[in-house]
Image (tube, rainbow, N blue to C red):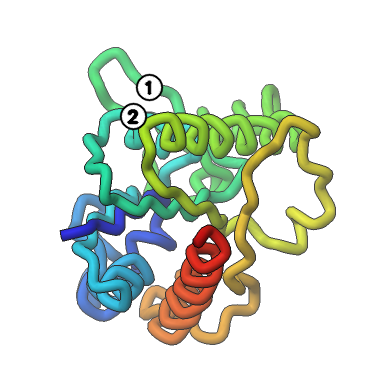
Amino acid sequence: MSRLVAFGCSNTKGDGLPDVYDIDKGLTPYNGLPSIHAWPKLLADKLEYECLNLAVAGCSNKHICDILLNTPFKKTDTVVFMWTYFSRSCFFQDDGSVKRIMVQDISCLGMPTDHRRWNKSYYKTFYTDQDAIKDAYFRANFAKLYLDSIGIKNYHTTCHEQHDIKKVKAPLWNNVELLDIGFTLPRIDIALDNDHPGLNSHKMFYNNLYNIIKEKEADDI
């Protein structure tokens, strides 16, 4: 059976959706299973594929690429990326863990003080928009080149806001089309955590992706 293999962050994993959200704790468990209501499962069901949702909440595009390179593929796979927000990064630690870098962690009281301080220092000292933009396109282009080289169909979208992407001039070497699937703020609905896309948003994402994929497959015939 063909597989749909999805890569992304919490917006791909389906954080906040009813089957994965812990109402008592007021959160989606970080290491929990992806939601069956998230767009990858809906899209896979529509295509009559098996779904392999490899999204990790809070991850960066750098981390997504690492997950990609450690994933064994089958020739019949179709891969879809929802690349995350360009401003994120991470550092791979010697003990095998991944230290994430994201703006939200600076003010997140649930994070250890040293982690919050570390993130604040990164954005104050090292971060620039231009570096983040170039890095995001590096990752997406690398992923496409890699999957093309092994004959795996791949499609790319992003949860980074489209109005920001349209203001940014992609590098001349860019060869990745970031499909606009309607991921905008305000969203058409919000999940139970009052943060992530809700059920109807995920339905819209998968429908838009399905139509784009079928259209591109028809053009390739």
**Residue at x 70% of width, y 36% of height:** 174
User: Residue 200 occupies which quadrant of the picture?
Assistant: bottom left
Q: Which mark is residue 92?
A: 1
- Secondary structure type for disc 2: helix
Residue sitting farthest toward the front: 221
Contact flag, marks 1 and 2 (Cβ < 8 Å):
no
Q: Is residue 200 left or right of residue 45?
A: right
Residue 79: image x %, image y %? 38, 51
Relative to 198, residue 156 above or below:
above
- Secondary structure type for disc 1: strand
Q: Looking at the image, which is closer to me, 72 or 122? A: 72
Q: Residues within 10 Å of mark 1 (few under 14, many from 20)?
A: few
Q: Looking at the image, which is closer to me, 148 or 38? A: 148
Residue 73: image x %, image y %? 25, 39
Amino acid under label 1? Answer: Phe
Can residue 163 be seen by looking at this rendering?
A: yes
Q: Which mark is residue 51?
A: none
Q: Which residue is mark 2?
A: 69
Q: Is residue 120 left or right of residue 221?
A: right
User: Residue 99 occupies which quadrant of the picture?
Assistant: top left
Residue 107: image x %, image y %? 54, 49
Residue 65: image x %, image y %? 42, 33
**Residue at x 42% of width, y 43% of height:** 59
Relative to 148, residue 38 above or below:
below
Ranked by sequence position, the earlier of labels 1 and 2 is: 2
**Residue at x 24% of width, y 57% of height:** 3
Amino acid under label 2? Answer: Leu
